[in-house]
Amino acid sequence: MIKIRPHHILCMKAYIGKGYSKEFNKNMENVICKLKDDSKEVEIVFGLDDICEKCPYNMGNGICKTQDKVNCIDSKIIGYFDIEEGKYKYNDLKKKVLLNLDEEKFDNICENCEWYSVTNCKKLILEDNI
C-alpha cells in the first residue's frame, strides 16, 4: 500500500517533472504512476511517506530535515479537509481535498513551501481540481 502524507496530495497534482534530484523525480513519477488507478487504496501518514523516500531532506530513521515546516503544511491540510491517519481510496481522498480547495486555502497551506514561487502549483491545482 502506498503511504502519503497529507500535503503530498497537492504536490502530486502539481508535479511537472521538477524535483530535488533525478532519484527524487523518478520516485515521485513512480508513486504517481501507481496512483493512476484512482480506486487504489492509500494510507495517510503523519510522517515520512513513499514520496519522501528519495528526498534529500530525508535524514533517515523517519526524520525530515524540514520536519517542522512540513508538519505545519500537513496540519493545515488535516484541519481544512478533516483528514486522519489511515486508509482511503485515493479518488475519495483527492475529491475530499481538491473539490474543497480554493485560492485562499491554497495560499495559506502552501505559502511557506519552497516550490510555491518556483512552479505554478496554484494554477495547476486550482484550474482543474480533479
Image (cartoon, rainbow, N blue to C red):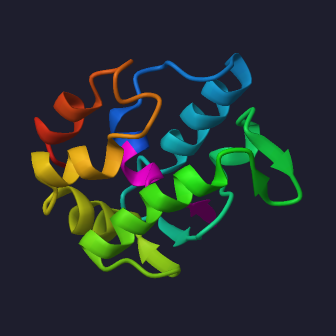
Q: Position of residue 24 (x, y in %)?
A: 67, 29
Seen in the picture, residue 53 relative to 15 is either above or below; the reply is below
Quarter of image, res 115: top left
Q: Quadrant of the N terminus?
A: bottom right
Quarter of image, res 75: bottom left
Relative horizontal placement of residue 79, taking residue 88 as reference (left or right):
left
In percent of the image, x 65 and y 57: which residue is there? 49
Q: How many marks?
A: 0
On whether residue 24 falls in the magenta region, the answer is no
Q: Position of residue 48 (x, y in %)?
A: 68, 58
In percent of the image, x 12 and y 50: which residue is there? 104
Front position in the image: 30 or 112: 112
Relative horizontal placement of residue 53, taking residue 95 as reference (left or right):
right
Q: Position of residue 76 (x, y in %)?
A: 35, 64
Q: Position of residue 27 (x, y in %)?
A: 66, 35
In percent of the image, x 65 and y 54: which residue is there? 67
Relative horizontal placement of residue 34, taking residue 95 as reference (left or right):
right
Quarter of image, res 29: top right
On whether residue 8 falls in the magenta region, the answer is yes
Q: Which residues are magenta?
A: 1-10
Q: Is residue 102 visible?
A: yes
Seen in the picture, residue 5 relative to 111 is either above or below; the reply is below
Relative horizontal placement of residue 48, taking residue 85 as reference (left or right):
right
Extreme-right residue of the structure = 61
Seen in the picture, residue 50 relative to 127 is either above or below; the reply is below
Front position in the image: 90 or 59: 59
Q: Is residue 6 visible?
A: no
